Image (cartoon, rainbow, N blue to C red):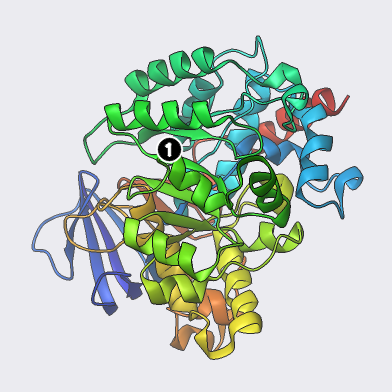
Amino acid sequence: MLTQLKRIHTIVSCDAKDNIYRDTDLWFRDGIIARIGDLDETPDAVFDCRGMALYPGFVNTHHHLYQYFNRSLKAVQGMELFDWLKTLYEIWKNLNGDTVYLSSLAAMGELMRYGCTTCFDHHYVFPRGAGDLIARQMAAADRLGIRFVASRGSMDLSKKDGGLPPDSVVQTIDEILTDSRRLIETWHRPEKDHMHDIVLAPCSPFSVSGDLMRQSAGLARAYGVRLHTHVGETRDEEDYTLSRFGLRPVAYMESLGWVGPDVWYAHGIHMNDEELDLLAATGTGVAHCPNSNMKLHSGVCRVPDMLERGVRVGLAVDGSASNDGSNMMDEIRSAFLLHRLAWGEKAPTGYRLVKLATAGSAALLGRDDIGRIEEGMRADCFLIDLEQPDLLCAELNPEDLFGNVGYHRPCKLVFVNGKLTVQDGRLLGVDEEKLYQEGAREIRRLLA
């Protein structure tokens, strides 16, 4: 199928040369970007994009989709990470397949309406008897049409072992590795054009044993899948690894084999110069989650220093309960203002943050076929309407507007793999009213 996006006001390519295209067409053929400019062929579908700006689809590199059904709960407002987790685990131990399916639909639906075309989720809560939760997430992604990377997260240290979670949501190493192997063999595909993938993602140094970390790394590398975990999020985590292992979190990760180009960490806030140099030298990446870091009073990630050293950085919204939103546009605005406040002239520009949220994030997931608008890339993109009073003057600089001005309206159009998934701000794959009713009913059950 050949699709023409006609008379686009501006294309922000986020390619290696930072090309910006004005008043031009974009063509998709069978899910691939076939041409930027004129093409002497008759399209099967045409979209009039006058007055619109087009961007590569955002790639979210860290989320906890199930937390979408625990947003803005009064009981946990003002808490910092460890107390926040211990309180919410008492709710999360009641997750079931319906919770995970509906929360994934709602959270990824919000992501996609605001320009996200690829979502990575870090799911690590597997209550006994809850069923195949990853399969339910994959089904939700397919229904929406979003590109999805799931994780087989894990926890094997409960409260009795010195960890944070209750016994009912931790598993033995054998249970975890057996299920990890099953999920890899079910969902991992080496082809680059896949819509699904799997990552192994033990939760964090304070809920996972060193043995599980080592064996997960060995299993992932045997199958060629990537590795992800939380590292350097809070001072409490630093105190934990120092007191138990005599090592700071990054050194502890290195001792377990958890550095390298197939590894990326969530947060990476509390890191010194030597640790940043290690990340740069080994190709280990960081998913930056500014809204979550501010809300939980975790600290400010040293993103300008990371970029200066060549550390691979992507952007992420983090779990909805620690952010209360799933909006990458909003994340760019928050990151821009946070780093302007903390770093002044060293702070990344609005456009640099768009590149982190697209090409930079894609690289963390091992994808070089998404995150840029170039011929031969996958046709993942979104468009917004520049010709509106809210964007007067800002439309002169569309590459920076998500940082400089902020933009918080759903997209006019979203395409994933060349297929239209959002039109005029509405999801095409789900009945939004029905999703609200079913989601509200499941939240009442969960909180009861």
**Quarter of the figure with residue 180:** top left
Q: Identify the residue at image location x=41%, y=66%.
A: 277
Q: Quadrant of residue 184?
A: top left
Residue 324 x %, y %: 72, 51
Farthest residue in the top direction? 129
- Judging depth in this view, the residue of 275 and 346 nearest the camera is 275
Q: Quadrant of residue 171?
A: top right
Residue 37: percent from left, percent from top: 18, 71
* Residue at the far right in the pictured view: 75
Q: Is residue 431 visible?
A: no
Image point 66% across, 21% down: which residue? 170
Q: Nearer the viewer, residue 359 or 103?
A: 359
Q: Residue furthest front?
A: 246
Q: Residue at x 52, y 39 (%)?
A: 121
Amino acid type shown at disc 1 = Val
Whether residue 121 is visible here, answered yes or no, is yes
Drawn side of residue 75 relative to residue 88, left or right: right
Up/down of 87 relative to 94, above or below: below
Q: Position of residue 17 (x, y in %)?
A: 23, 77
Asked if residue 230 lies left or right of residue 4, the reply is: right
Provide residue 333's location: percent of width, then percent of height.
60, 72
In the rendered view, tell whether residue 202 sits above or below residue 287: above
The residue that label 1 is drawn on is 149
Q: Please count the marks in the image.
A: 1
Whether 174 is drawn above or below 221: the answer is above
Helix, strand or loop at mark 1: strand
